């Protein structure tokens, strides 16, 4: 009985030390969408085809989830293999305030190659729901606060969701898993 309890406690401790990786078999195609990137150019699901992309949903004035996740990704992107083979895309959950210029300045604080997307709120909502990303905003709150998922989505070169990375995110683990999944 004592041994089983220790094993259970160790299993629980390990499960909370790093996020979980879920590989989708088969990969789930993204829904059609049309947004605007940080350069003011159109960006659709077809824009991700032919390359690996890591997708994250958040907003520029997020006080916790977004900056914490981006700090982890900043450490991951130091790796030259990932920097060449993987593109990071940040989809704004606050398109009213997150203009292309605001997103570009926000993301540049973490990595100048990180790309942001904004645009029509209904399209962003449909895309986030199709990607199983939770978000909620209290309409009565005096200050903007969007509660949202911190899941990272790996999009394959065919434009489909290949894997989900659930928080908490740890740079070394994420780097190893990404390199394993995107290797030729």
Image (cartoon, rainbow, N blue to C red):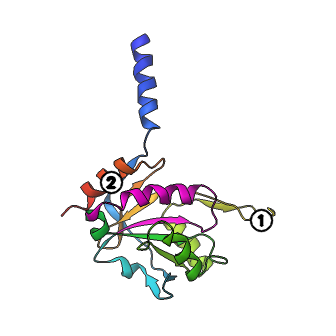
Q: Is residue 137 left or right of residue 17?
A: right
> Where does label 2 land, which residue?
175
Front residue of 51 and 127: 51
Q: Please report the residue visible at 61 percent of the width from the left and 77 percent of the height from the top.
A: 122
Residue stretch in magenta: 53-80
The quadrant the C terminus occupies is bottom left
Q: Is residue 149 visible?
A: no
User: Where, by quadrant of the figure, is residue 7 drawn?
Assistant: top left
Q: Is residue 101 visible?
A: yes
Q: Is residue 81 left or right of residue 154?
A: left
- The question of residue 55 being in magenta is answered with yes
**Mark count:** 2
- The question of residue 93 being in magenta is answered with no
Q: Would you call the spot at circle 2 few (<14 residues within 10 Å), some (14-19), or many (20 or more)? A: some
Of the two numbered discs 1 and 2 on the same chain, state the one appearing first in sequence. 1
The quadrant the N terminus occupies is top left
Residue at the farthest left position: 184
Front residue of 131 and 72: 72
Q: Is residue 173 left or right of residue 120?
A: left
Image coordinates for residue 94, horizontal then vertical, percent: 63, 72
Against 88, residue 70 (above or below) is above
User: Where, by quadrant of the figure, is residue 156 drawn?
Assistant: bottom left
> Where does label 1 land, which residue?
139
Element class at badge 2: helix
Element class at badge 1: loop
């Amino acid at each position: 009985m004592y041994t089983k309890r220790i094993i259970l406690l160790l299993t629980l401790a390990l499960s909370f030390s790093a996020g979980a990786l879920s590989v989708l078999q088969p990969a789930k195609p993204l829904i059609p969408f049309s947004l605007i990137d940080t350069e003011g150019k159109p960006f659709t699901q077809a824009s991700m085809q032919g390359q690996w992309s890591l997708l994250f949903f958040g907003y520029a004035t997020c006080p916790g989830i977004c900056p914490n996740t981006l700090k982890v990704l900043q450490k991951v992107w130091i790796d030259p293999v990932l920097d060449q083979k993987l593109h990071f895309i940040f989809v704004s959950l606050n398109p009213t305030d997150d203009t292309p210029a605001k997103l570009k300045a926000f993301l540049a604080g973490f990595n100048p190659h990180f790309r942001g997307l904004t645009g029509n709120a209904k399209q962003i909502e449909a895309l986030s729901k199709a990607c199983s990303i939770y978000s909620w905003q209290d309409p009565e709150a005096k200050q903007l606060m969007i509660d949202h998922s911190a899941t990272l989505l790996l999009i394959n070169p065919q434009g489909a969701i290949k894997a989900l990375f659930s928080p908490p995110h740890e740079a070394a683990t994420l780097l190893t898993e990404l390199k394993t999944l995107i290797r030729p």
